[in-house]
Image: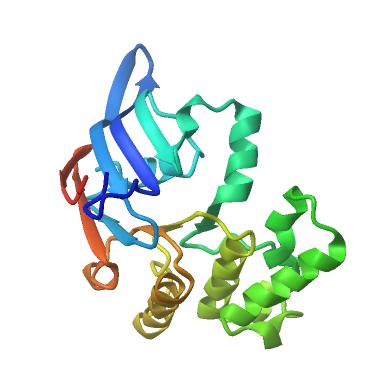
Amino acid sequence: MSAGGTAPLLRIRGLRKAYRRGDQFVPVLEGIDLDVAAGDFVALMGPSGSGKSTLLNLVAGIDRPSAGTIEVRGVDIATLSQAELADWRAAQVGFVFQFYNLIPVLDALENVELPLLLTGLGARARRERARAALALVGLDDRASHRPAELSGGQQQRVAIARALVGDPSLIVADEPTGDLDRHTGEEVLALLERLVADLGKTIVMVTHDPKAAARARRLVHLEKGVLVDGGTV
């Protein structure tokens, strides 16, 4: 339970992950316990090789743990089948990446609409939601622009709109300002803060930048696959 007595949105217990190399298993995460409350903005920091991106991928259902539980809104995603996990990701998780991962031949509106193709929404409803998401990030006037016609900061804002469009429970961001200059990065971080403050979104962000981490509400440190502070509350 969280400090306020309510169940956390994300609850991790005894999480372990190891990868096989030849005839050996190399541990990456060892016994992680972590709670994240709904509406929190958590920055995950640690040196290279500490397991930050591995933990983010496990939380997002991209990878599977070797042991332990990952509960999001009470659902242990480690127990889901591949098909169930794909449906869960589409409904519950929004992704923001360092290099945007936009489709070059699609315009901004089409890129934002992509996750909705996995839902039962009709074409008109998908377009309306995509336009609303672009408006939230201040890019409704760039809907017809392709990625090459947008600045790096604008591309990342399109990526954030794409992460928002399905109204996910959790947004995971992997170095979202790592490919941006300082000023543009600050604008993106301010947008993430507004998503938490104004929309009540929950964000887990991996970053190497202490200034980026300072914009989060809570800081979690990993060292050699072990959570050294900032875990359960």
Most extreme residue toward the top is 23
In this view, which residue lies farthest toward the right? 123
Q: Nearer the viewer, residue 226 or 98?
A: 226
In this rendering, the answer to whether 175 lies above or below 64 is: below
Residue occupying image coordinates x 22% and y 68%? 210
Outermost residue toward the bottom? 141
Q: Answer yes or no: is residue 108 visible.
A: no
115 or 207, nearer to the observer: 115
Residue at the (40%, 28%) spot, across then down: 65
Residue 27 image offset from top left, x and y in percent: 27, 26
Q: Could you tell whether 62 is left or right of 187 in the image?
A: right
Q: Residue at x 58, y 79 (%)?
A: 136
Residue 222 lies, in percent from the top left, at: 21, 46
Q: Position of residue 23 (x, y in %)?
A: 35, 11
| Image position, residue 200 (x, y; %) | 44, 67
Residue 111 occupies quadrant: bottom right
Closer to the camera, 6 or 145? 6
Residue 70 shows in this picture: yes
